[in-house]
Amino acid sequence: MRNKFIESLIEMAEENERVILIIGDLGFSVVEPFQEKFPERFINAGICEQNMTSLAAGMAKEGFKVFIYSIGNFPTFRAAEQVRNDICYHNLDVTIVTVGGGLAYGNLGYSHHAIQDYGLMRLFPEMTIISPGDPNEVGNCMDFISENNSPKYLRLRKAGEINYTKLNMKLTPGLWNPVIINNPKKIFLSTGYGMQLAFDEINENPAFKDYSLYSCPIWGQNYNKHQSSQFEDFDQVISMEDHLKAGGFGSWIMENVKIKNNFKLGYISNLVIGKVGDEKWLLKNLVIE
């Protein structure tokens, strides 16, 4: 996903000379192609996420399309005040890009486990959450980012993800996109790495072998109104995400639909907190209920 992001960002920067990339002293081995091609539009702000965020807001205020890039929790929780007051309050065109969403940095411990970031970022009414499930969806989401000038949170994993979706699909914010069609009445509804988790359940758990898979990579408060009506086509919906239940994608769905007996949530249990290990082992804390 990281590589697809940089590839798409370079294409965007070739067409828009106002595109700026600011990093928090990481991403090397990934960001160099952008740095080499657009050195005057590349800034390493150092390990100063709060300053990086305010810098991005100031540049966006002057008409630049700014991307800031760091690991999951650093430009979100560490810079929350700057995100709220500098970017969102002024409704600026800054895309906060994080890598290692969910438990992708499992062995680095709780400081690197981005399992509460949806809960924080979706509190801001101006913020659109963009959480692609595979590299193709990254490219499709970048098309939306290119056209949209309000605050955005782009949540990426790392590398090596499998493509399930088609490239060059037009994504409509808040709407559910079919990925795998089996039973048209029973579906998993994923965001981000939830796409892979749902695919695994369909293929490995006999209880879900006939379920279809839908994706909702672009969501947030601006798209609340689209959720309730989409349930009408299905007998069973299971949301799936690599995030805690509280404040997550499934919780967002529940907030925006009338109580329905045909809705279950797939999420990471609170029991994962404090555990350190590789992602596969940590994901044993996945719950569907």
Image (cartoon, rainbow, N blue to C red):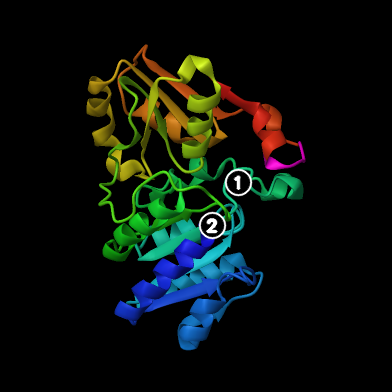
User: Helix, strand, or loop for circle 1?
Assistant: loop
Front-most of residues 181 and 71: 181
In this rendering, would 266 be left or right of 8?
right
Mark 1 touches mark 2? (CB < 8 Å) = yes
Local packing at callout 1 (Cα closer than 10 Å; few below 14, some 14-19, many 20+) is many
User: Helix, strand, or loop for circle 2?
Assistant: strand
The residue under label 2 is 98
Q: Quadrant of residue 45?
A: bottom right
- State the image coordinates of residue 115 (x, y, percent, origin top left): 59, 41
The residue under label 1 is 114
Whether the magenta-drawn stretch holds residue 278 is answered as yes
- State the image coordinates of residue 63 (x, y, percent, origin top left): 32, 77
- State the image coordinates of residue 237 (x, y, percent, origin top left): 37, 22
Q: Which residue is painted at 34% across and 16% down in the image?
A: 259
Q: Amino acid at mark 2?
A: Thr
Q: Which residue is painted at 64% across and 43% down in the image?
A: 103
- The rendered magenta stretch, by its main secondary structure, is classed as loop
- State the image coordinates of residue 84 (x, y, percent, origin top left): 46, 56
Residue 247 showing in the rendered view: no
Q: Amino acid at mark 1?
A: Ala
Local packing at callout 2 (Cα closer than 10 Å; few below 14, some 14-19, many 20+) is many
Q: Which residues are magenta?
A: 275-279
In this rendering, would 64 be left or right of 24?
left
Q: CA distance from mark 1 to mark 2?
A: 9 Å
Q: Which residue is painted at 43% across and 44% down in the image?
A: 122
In this rendering, would 125 be left or right of 55?
left
